[in-house]
Amino acid sequence: MRKELILFSILAAAALPAGATLGGTAESVVTDQSKLHAKRAVVDRQNYSVHEITSNDGTLIREYVTPAGKVFGVSWNGPTIPDLTQLLGVYNAEFQTAMRAKRGRRSSAAVHNSDLVVESSGHMRAFRGRAYLNSMLPSGVTEDVVQ
Amino acid sequence: MRPVPWRDSAAAAATAVLLMGLAACSGGSSAASSSGSGTTGVTTTPPPVNNVQPVLMDYGPIVNGQSVGFNNTLYTTVVICVPGTFTCQSIDHVLVDTGSTGLRIPASLVALSLPYVTDSSNNPIGNCVQYADTSYQWGPIVKVDVQLAGEVASSVPIQIVGPTNFAAAPSSCTSGGTPAQTVTDLGANGILGVGLFRQDCGSACAAAAPPAVYFTCPASGCVPASVPVATQLQNPVWMFPQDNNGLAIVLPQVGAAGSVSLAGSMIFGIGTQADNALGGAQAQGADSEGNFTTTFNGKTYPGSFIDSGSSGYFFLDSPTTGLANCAANGDANGFYCPPSPVAFTAINSGPNPRGTGVAVSINVAFAIANGLSLIDSPSVVFNNLGGPNPAIFDWGIPFFLGRTVFVGIEGQSSAAGTGPYWAY
């Protein structure tokens, strides 16, 4: 039983080469990146930084981090949708609840709640999306940077 | 009421397909006599195959006496057979999707005994597909012969969605998203992906094992795996012996109030028979991901695409378009709700698929009406239903109404050039 659990957690980590979830800290990014031999780059911007990680199928995942080390936004762009349970963390449930209320719309996803915003679009072989928390945008930074 | 005659005609179509298959086996002599050339005993070009597959938009499949279809869904009837046999079944109300590749049928509908496709270790292969709305489908791969009109694709890998006797979907596949595993989930009896590509994933899944596409499924559990291109889900059209360079979807126009149903055609081949000539259609290439650029109000939006599986025009956002969003707590949540219809024009552009180096630009006019009024009406076919989709254009099924839209499959050539391309 324990063995299965360990295997499962390794698989879950392998499913997404990004450890930091929306609203969480960016600390685990470095650990996961080295564990997974994923390509990673950090770009510093005015009042935030961008951590870029490329998964093995070429999907580019960006994490937008406040000066205090909190992830205020994430985005993805590539052939597959990353594991959103990991990327959005506790906010995935809120996103999925909102999506279920939109049954009948067959296309992209766009949830604009008061704090949480998630947009997911594209088609097989070309997906893109982003999520951010309005409450955590650093001062002087707009949601337009998350893309 | 409506699906009943559709089922009947579907059964008749399936029978016709089987008879045609048998006739084809009797050899070329019937070809010569039917051509009326007067020659006998001479090998001639086989007669053209019936390449016209009926398509339909309506209330969708019936589950427990209730229609479960969504608005603006294009359906067709697919015949699947045990490979190399005439043991077949007909499945109506399969969603026709130019935004994906491969045939995916809910396990509950499959009456045939179809063995799993296995890898080199004899383990079944599981497939996960995730859609942009974060819904997913999971299940094993099997092979069938696929019959559409008079065309047959042999030994096509397809996905059986959600069988209870197969491993559960891995968490990387579900990703917390909404299952599209049952007929009711999906609003359709499966998905027929006839998009721009030959395979769902292609070389990327042969060279590596992306986290949530293909899996090897030994008894100990499913793990991500690379899968050869030939074992992946295939666009059945490119596997036809003829008329395999693409297809055209032909649908009539509807009025501003929409319609309760609509009948049209899916014609296989581009410029291969008298009925599928390009005519005045302009061909516009798509990139290796299937995207092109749409220009709107002088601004360019790369990453745009055409998708018969999308139920509306999904484009940009309320501030950019000036269109009000529908109320979040109403029936039309996720759509645009302008008080009165608004007309727009945009320009789609892509490389000339003949490789001339000159871009092809095509003007597109469309209108968006009040989504709540449309959705609350009895109609289910709309040419003016739309919603937000930040920074890109998803030209969904309304784009196909009143048009002939050609889908040029990657690596396949026609007078328009080499795919992937659209022509309309």
Image (cartoon, rainbow, N blue to C red):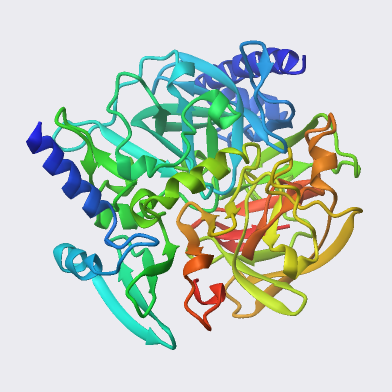
Residue B400 position, x and y percent, is 74, 48
Residue A10 position, x and y percent, is 16, 49
Q: Nearer the viewer, residue B312 or B101?
A: B312
Q: Is residue B2 above or below residue A29?
A: above
Residue B133 position, x and y percent, is 53, 47
Residue B37 at least partly seen: no
User: Which image quadrant: the N terminus of chain B?
Assistant: top right
Q: Nearer the viewer, residue B345 or A66?
A: A66
Report the label total.
0
Q: Is residue B209 above or below residue B183?
A: below
Q: Is residue A128 above or below residue A83?
A: below
Q: Is residue B346 above or below residue A44?
A: above
User: Which image quadrant: the C terminus of chain B?
Assistant: bottom right
> Is B168 positioned to the left or the right of B362 in the image?
left
> Is B48 positioned to the left or the right of B242 in the image?
right
> Is B341 positioned to the left or the right of A10 in the image?
right
Q: Nearer the viewer, residue B333 or B210?
A: B333
- Looking at this view, name the residue that lies furthest to the bottom: A46
Residue B76's quadrant in the figure? top right
Give the residue displayed 80% in from the left and 42% down from the top: B372
- Looking at this view, name the residue that lies furthest to the left: A3
Residue A77's quadrant in the figure? bottom left
Residue A86 position, x and y percent, is 33, 53
Residue B241 at least partly seen: yes
